Amino acid sequence: MSAAPPTDLVPVTIDGQEIAVPKGTNVIEAARRVGVDVPFYCYHPKLSVVGNCRMCLVELGQPAVDLATKAPVMDPVTGRQRIDWIPRPQIGCATNVTPGLHVRTQTPQIKACREGVMEFLLINHPLDCPICDQAGECKLQEQATGYGRGYSRFIEQKNVKPKRTQLGPRVMLDDERCILCSRCIRFCKEIAKDDVLGFTDRGSYSTLTCYPGRQLTNNYSLNTVDLCPVGALTSTDFRFKMRVWFLKQTPGIDPESSAGANTVVWSREGVIYRITPRDNDAVNDSWMADSGRELYKQVRSPGRLAGVRVAGTPAALDAAVAQAGELFRAAAGRVAVVGSGRSSVEEQWLTRRLTEALQAPAWLVSRVGEGDGLLVSADRNPNVRGALVTGLIRSLPTQRLDELTAAIDAGRVTTVVAVGEDLAAAGLTRAQLAKVKIVHLGTAASPTSEASAVLLPALTLYEKAGCFVNQQFRLQRFQRAVPGPAGAHDDLELLARLIGASGGAVAPADLAGVWREVAAALPALAGRTFTTVPDLGLALDPAPFAGLPFIEGPGLHYTPAKG
Amino acid sequence: MPAPAERRIIFKHIDEPGYTPDLACYLRHGGYASLRKALGMAPAAIIDEVKKSGLRGRGGAGFGCGLKWSLVDRKSGKPIYLVVNADESEPGTFKDRYIIHQDPHQLLESIMVSSWANNVRQAYIYIRGEFPHGARILEKAIAEARAANLVGPNVLGSGYSCEIYVHRGAGAYICGEETGLIESLEGKRPYPRIKPPYFPAVLGLYQCPTIVNNVETLCHVKHIVDVGGEEFAKIGTPGNTGTRILCVSGHVRRPGYYEYEVGRITLGQLLNEVCGGPLPGRTFKAIIPGGSSAKVLRWGETFTLKNKDGSTRTLAAEDIPMDFDTLAACGTMGGSGGVIVMDDSVNMVEALANINAFYAHESCGQCTPCREGSLWMKKITARMVHGQARAEDGALLQGVADQIAGRTICAFGEACSWPTQSFLAKFGDEFRAYPEAKTAPRPESVPLA
């Protein structure tokens, strides 16, 4: 033998196509790489393999060798090494590639296997697609079309099982539709560590259910809905609201913490209907927390700010910006800026520009919660690291704005620009709010918006595009899913105009312009543009911030730095 | 040719007047001498004797016991477990329960010998849930043996320690499947494991190397140690060594259990001579030779079998020797030794409806083909016997069964489809004629749902 192969690549042949795949790859994934679709239901790359659906049956073979001499056995017809095929079909999900493995997926036997499984799965399935929420994204529908016979030979009575079982506050179960793939059970046990789901009864009467006296209440319960290949598990929030084929999918980022789960925002005609996780093996795998899925409701919340106001009176944006300029000039040297860890990198850059134009100190509001060890981290701001990268702040924000309140009490600060933050929630009293002039960019009514001298309604996360830097120092992009309401303005535009009103150099009011600036000013982003940020994020170098006492504990794909 | 004499090794004391299941009785009959002998032997030597004996599993598959032992991963550093499969549930099979009820120490001694041979420190007897009395007998026997220093720490002063535990099943046929049994023993639903990777010899109980042996198989180990592997191999026929217990039920005059050298008695000798032939005025019709999962034989059918030299011979069903290999060559199997006899009073559609009801009830429901197919087949045959048979039902049954066998996680797929496949192959005319036969519906034979 010469030197060992340089990498752990295993040569395999799938439907005649040769490919080398990493050791440990299973046949389903290996086939995917050569464009061969091996259908499955129960398999999920992030869950344990159980092999119960039997949809991924394939034929496996190995090049024949003489048992005594170990010499290859040649096929006299083809002149190549003979392939010894295993007579029985094998499941692709549980078969990891071995050197020289041959796979056939298109033989009459495999076609018959798939037709058989499809027929079996459908005989006791209610076939109520017209009233089923899963229609349009149902694996059973897709694979019945792709691999089924198109007719059934079943004339018996179908099994009857429980319908409309509320498994938990957010998940509804229809047992008749369940194909018993056990993905939801494995997810709860293996990922959510909340082993509440299981099967009762046996055979075709097997029934998915919750452990007696328990409910599926964990904050990851809706992932079972995403995982469910059929319409058995549906979201109480989303079900019957909209057919999925009408929905537009927009890539987003979960803003509830610095974990930064990748999401898809599903909308139609300017209305968001649901948020689901977007696969990112470096960040959130295929999961996200339930809590992050409801945040779209802020878009159409009753308290949404929808009109520029000056001293509580509706005003035009030009007039309001002019008024802000007046306030800045009147309070020159006594202006402070409160930025936000919820603002995008781009907004934080312009916020920094604003602080420089005003020669004002900047604070960031910290949000701390309990990390769940998975995808909700202790830092409930999605973008504190963005503020560090953009240079808006140099140290981590503290819980309370004590320095600011002291400065207000002492009269050293008389005007505050609150970018996306409610100062009352950050610890300012009503008296303190009343003592200063407030220029506020916000989306929802709050004590700060009520007390604002200049109120500038801005956009929610879902109405704008931008980037966050998550706990891994991964720059991740979100896109605009829906337009903002009338009367609200893009945050970048508002910040750019405030910079203008403060006498600073002309600032860009759009993403491309901001990126031209940050690419030139920030070494970490040198040469980058917004449109070329990879879909799965861009890993930034955390070294410049290595000494900072970040508060996140261990989470999925995240290990805190030691020290 | 007259039937050979019964040769009782395992069942030597079964039904023997005065023989009791307690330790004193067992010791009076020379009990635990094999264990003393074994403890004086090197473990590898015992494994070697078992290999030489040619002993094959009596649980159903007929897998070589010595080979099974030799596959055990002994380098993992993990403990090796011995699990005794006493989940005797195969319809038509009633042998292990008599060992347990009447001669439990024979089993315990064999467990201890096998444990010593395989460096096992914990052995489990997984006993069928419907055998509560058997479980109590075993518990009592273990307590007796433990008190006599035959089980437990420092057995007979040898320095070797091994505990035996009894675990009762909860009433599921699938627990007889070895990986389902292991799951159940671990306290989970008895979902059989996928193989690969979960071969018990490597990743068995608690993910440790595990030997799972049937009660009857294991009991032979004691006798192999007694006489030596080579001597044991002379019993029976080459490749089909030892004796095995044949459990005959159904339409014969003298049903019951009989122990014969493997392959030394034919099906015809067993049924006609040993069991006294068919009931008065009846003739044999169908025989299931190895438990309900085995494919049915039609009485009177002939088989063309290949000889080793390439020539062929013709064999009538009644001349089939009751061994592993010939039954397999005839398309069925020795299975668990449960010989189910049906005479000409039996309607095969109704018989299959009964079998299908069993398998639909016992399918664990883990994998699709068996879960859905077994109940579908049951629904079809149930409908047929409820007077709604259709001409195409036979072909449909065949189609469903063909979609199950060979595509499931465990052998239950074959177990539930082989009856349908073989009933149709051997008695297809009855299924085709059934709709026109205008036989009165026989709903009592099987419930509809």
Image (spheres, rainbow, N blue to C red):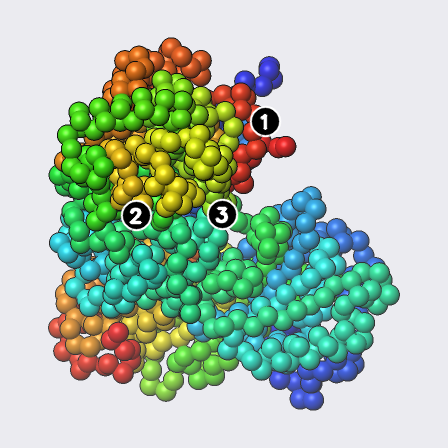
Give SS at disc 3: loop
Disc 2 to disc 1, how far (Cα)?
A: 35 Å
> Is A72 placed left or right of A453 in the picture?
right
Above or below, comparing residue A198 to residue B26 in the picture: above
Numbered badge on residue A547: 1
Q: Residue at x 48, y 40 (%)?
A: A400
Q: Are marks 1 and 3 in contact (CB under 8 Å)?
A: no
Mark 2: give few (<14), some (14-19) or many (20+) Cα within 10 Å: few
Q: Is residue B106 visible?
A: yes
**Measured from the top left, where is residue B427 in percent x and y?**
27, 66
Q: Chain of mark 2?
A: A
Q: Are marks 2 and 1 in contact (CB under 8 Å)?
A: no
Task: Give the chain letter at badge 3.
Answer: A
Q: Is residue A490 left or right of residue B226?
A: left
Is the same chain shared between marks 2 and 1?
yes
Q: Residues within 10 Å of mark 3 (few under 14, many from 20)?
A: few
Q: Chain of mark 1?
A: A
Which residue type does callout 1 highlight?
A: Gly
Relative height, residue B412 to residue A28 (above, below)? below
On the picture, is A141 further left or further right than B217? left
On the image, numbered disc 3 is attached to which residue? A370
- Quick check: can you spot residue A112? no
At 58% from the left and 82% from the top, the residue drawn is B133
Give the image location of residue B203, x and y in percent.
58, 49
Residue located farthest toward the right when viewing the structure as drawn: B157
Q: CA distance from mark 1 to mark 3?
A: 22 Å
Q: Counting residues from the N terminus, which is met first, the one under dot 2 or under dot 1?
A: 2
Q: Nearer the N terminus, badge 1 or badge 3?
A: 3
Whether B37 is drawn above or below A219: the answer is below
The residue type indicated by label 2 comes to Glu
At horizontal 20% and vertical 72% (from top left) the residue drawn is: B384
